[in-house]
């Protein structure tokens, strides 16, 4: 059974409902990706999640939720006196407003133990992480993660990442840019979002974004650009694939995560980049038409 591993932080999500009350859920960019990978891949693919959680009831509830939805939790670490991070989200005219509490988040220690990370990475077909995964770690743990990813790549594991720049999580813009580029040098797939790359790296076109990542030895770059065409660039491919239709979003949470998942699921099962991007647009359109980060899996299968 081929195995995929997503690495990062799954958080407690309190989402405001139309009646003004809040509903508890679980979400986070790499966990959202694991969710949609599980939805898009056949049962003979294993999708696992790697993070650190606490010893509190909410961590237990989160683990139960993952397992109940077919996402493997075998390698998730448990840390005494820690708990998951938390965020509150509200919608205003389809736009998301966030407030975060992650000071005691156990996920910050996910790469403290190189041996645990190496065990989780062993015999994976592909590992996925993001710029947020990098940002929540201290410098030593970030180096440990990149070293273990490099070792896994040397054994044949494919590496995929979304730069997902969040400046508030970094000590400086330079640290953010340098860390993302160091990670991209390991990647077989990179999924940048053009407006973010334009803002934080100064790119003027999606083509410039793709060229910058390819120059870092990235294998395949998929530049997302909202409702505009996605740009796919590699040594063998240069394509712009537009969505087949545009919808007014209900909630854009996890739009990029679901796109990445659908694209990777297609590519890993032998689909060419053009059809993979078309499938990714279709899945993202479904996701933004529904409230919340995690729409029911059967809607996007």
Image (spheres, rainbow, N blue to C red):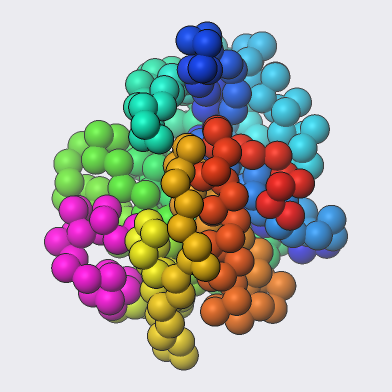
Tell me which secondary structure the magenta stretch mostly adopts: helix
Residue 211 is drawn in which quadrant?
bottom left
Vertical position of residue 180 compared to residue 99: above or below:
below
| x and y percentages locating residue 175 in the rendered image | 22, 48
Q: Is residue 48 visible?
A: no
Name the residue located 66 percent from the left edge and 25 percent from the top edge. 62
Residue 115 horizontal/vertical position (percent): 59, 45
- Position of residue 53 in the picture relative to residue 205 (left or right): right
Please state, as top left, top right, bottom left or bottom right, where the C terminus lies in the image.
Answer: bottom right
Side of 167 where 21 appears, left or right: right
Spot occupied by residue 291 in the image (x, y as percentages of width and height):
55, 33
Decide which of 235, 88 is in the foreground and name it. 88
* Magenta-drawn segment: 192-213
Residue at the (36%, 64%) spot, across then down: 228
Q: Residue at x 75, y 26 (%)?
A: 64
Seen from the viewer's position, the closer of residues 184 and 227 is 227
Quadrant for the N terminus in the image: bottom right
Residue furthest bottom in the image: 236
Q: Is residue 169 visible?
A: yes
In percent of the image, x 30 and y 61: which residue is there?
A: 194
């Amino acid at each position: 059974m081929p195995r995929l591993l997503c690495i990062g932080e799954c958080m407690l999500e309190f989402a405001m409902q139309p009646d003004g009350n809040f509903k508890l859920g679980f979400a986070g960019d790499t966990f959202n990706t694991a969710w949609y990978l599980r939805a898009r891949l056949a049962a003979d693919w294993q999708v696992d999640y790697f993070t650190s959680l606490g010893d509190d009831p909410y961590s237990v509830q989160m683990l139960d939720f993952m397992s109940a939805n077919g996402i493997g939790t075998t390698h998730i670490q448990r840390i005494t006196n820690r708990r998951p991070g938390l965020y509150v989200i509200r919608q205003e005219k389809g736009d998301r407003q966030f407030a975060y509490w992650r000071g005691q988040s156990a996920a910050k220690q996910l790469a403290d133990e190189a041996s645990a990370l190496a065990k989780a990475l062993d015999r994976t077909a592909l590992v996925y992480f993001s710029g947020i995964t990098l940002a929540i770690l201290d410098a030593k743990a970030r180096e440990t993660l990149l070293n273990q990813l490099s070792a896994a790549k040397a054994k044949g594991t494919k590496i995929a990442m979304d730069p997902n720049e969040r400046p508030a999580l970094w000590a400086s813009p330079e640290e953010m840019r340098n860390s993302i580029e160091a990670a991209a040098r390991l990647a077989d797939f990179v999924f940048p979002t053009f407006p973010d790359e334009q803002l934080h790296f100064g790119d003027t076109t999606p083509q410039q974004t793709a060229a910058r990542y390819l120059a870092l030895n990235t294998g395949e770059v998929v530049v997302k650009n909202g409702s505009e065409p996605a740009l796919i660039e590699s040594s063998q491919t240069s394509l712009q694939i537009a969505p087949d239709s545009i919808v007014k979003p209900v909630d854009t949470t996890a739009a990029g995560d679901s796109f990445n998942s659908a694209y990777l699921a297609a590519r890993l099962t032998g689909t060419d980049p053009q059809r993979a991007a078309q499938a990714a647009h279709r899945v993202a359109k479904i996701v933004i038409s529904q409230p919340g980060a995690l729409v029911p899996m059967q809607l996007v299968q």
